[in-house]
Amino acid sequence: MQWHPNPIERRAHASLKWSTFPENELPLWVADMDCAPPPCVNNTLNQALEHGIFGYGTEPKGFRDAWVDHLRNTHDWTIEPDWIVPVAGVVPGMRFALMAHPSIQRILTPTPAYPYFKTVPSIERRTEYPIALRRVGNILEPALTEIAQTLETLTEPAAILWCNPHNPGGTVYSKQFIETLVATASKHDTLIISDEIWADLILNDKRHIPLGLIAPTDQPTITLMAATKTFNVAGFGCAVAIIPEPKTRARYLETQIAMPHVAPLAYAVTESCLRNGWQWHSELITALQTNRDTVIEWAKSHPELEVTTGDATFLAWIESHTQTNLSERFAAKGIRLSPGTPFGSETAVRLNFGTNPATLTEALRRMDAALL
């Protein structure tokens, strides 16, 4: 694995990350990385080009087995292949979960969180109940009692839309936390929808605990996973909803009628990464740890900020309790970060450190100038 030496060249390929802003600005915002994916991706695409026919596709026979093997070998979670529902992305998967449950009108969401945790309930006309996350050490976590207390006040069916590992805080929730969350949801007949797209980008000595590993198979849960963040192949929309409970799965499957399906190349790229991308992945983790440490060291010079990198992802959450214009100040110095307001905080920004060290160092230098 190698960082792209000159990621500005990505502008020539209609990159959302690099083409959205002027050329004199460094974009460290949307969550893709400035590196090529594992070599197996090119091999898979070259084989497809040699075949040369791109008609309608179907799910490859080995796709579910690749997920079953990965979850068993990496996360000690043994699943049945028919628990899997392929979908074209984790965000669509979140929306399908709400579409499948029209009677559920109350949605508990962590705050701050990836903006779609607010957008999806809103466009499905559900009422959001934010669960505040607080900084504890170098992670963001909620008071579990607040989840229980919120559910106690509700008289209508509810769902918990969770994120583990957390975006933007990098929290890897413990087994004890997941056990308590599962028990709380069970007590209140509450569906849990768990976005676990970051499950394989753990940067510290932590273990990801899948929701479905803890929850009984007869409890309604939906675990959403994808290889797209892990292997930097976001352009190949492919995810899975893992739903052990049959009635919940049947309702979810009904939402797939007249919806975009996973493209054949996206299936193939995902399977190739899950089977053959792990040496590259090991090198990536080392590179991300180095960049993460650079951000942590930079933060020491700015005690006026709370910089949270957590234990996972390639994201840093930067919070100021004295300024509401961090995003604008950084943009004025040519640094584009994700504004905190869509995440649920007007005083924060999210930084993507998945880039080459030279680009990151220059970005942090410009951020220094913005904070003078």
Image (cartoon, rainbow, N blue to C red):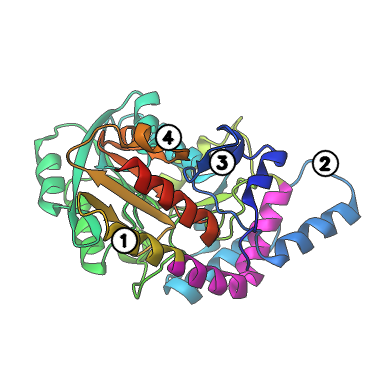
Of callouts 1 and 4, which one flags the residue occurring earlier in the amino acid sequence?
Answer: 1
* Residue 216 appears in the figure: no
Using residue 68 as the reference point, say whether residue 104 is left or right of it. left
In the displayed structure, would residue 275 be above or below residue 93?
Answer: below
Identified by mark 3, the residue type is Lys
**Residue 79, above or below 247:** below
Q: Which residue is mark 4?
A: 331
Q: Provide the residue designation for mark 2.
A: 55
Tell me what residue is drawn at x 59 percent, y 54 percent: 34
Magenta segment boundaries in residue numbering? 264-290
Name the amino acid, label 2: Gly
Going from N to C along the chain, the mark reached first, 1 or 2, is 2
Q: Which residue is mark 3?
A: 17
Residue 321 appears anywhere in the view: yes
**Disc 4 residue type?**
Ala
Pointer 2 with pointer 3, Cβ within 8 A: no
Q: Which residue is mark 1?
A: 310
Q: Nearer the viewer, residue 304 or 32?
A: 304
* Label 2 close to label 4 by CB (< 8 Å): no
Which of the two residues, 260 or 202, is positioned nearer the viewer here? 202
**Disc 4 versus disc 3: nearer the observer:** 4
Indicate which label's residue lies in the foreground, 2 or 3.
3
Q: CA distance from mark 1 to mark 2?
A: 43 Å
Q: CA distance from mark 2 to mark 4?
A: 44 Å
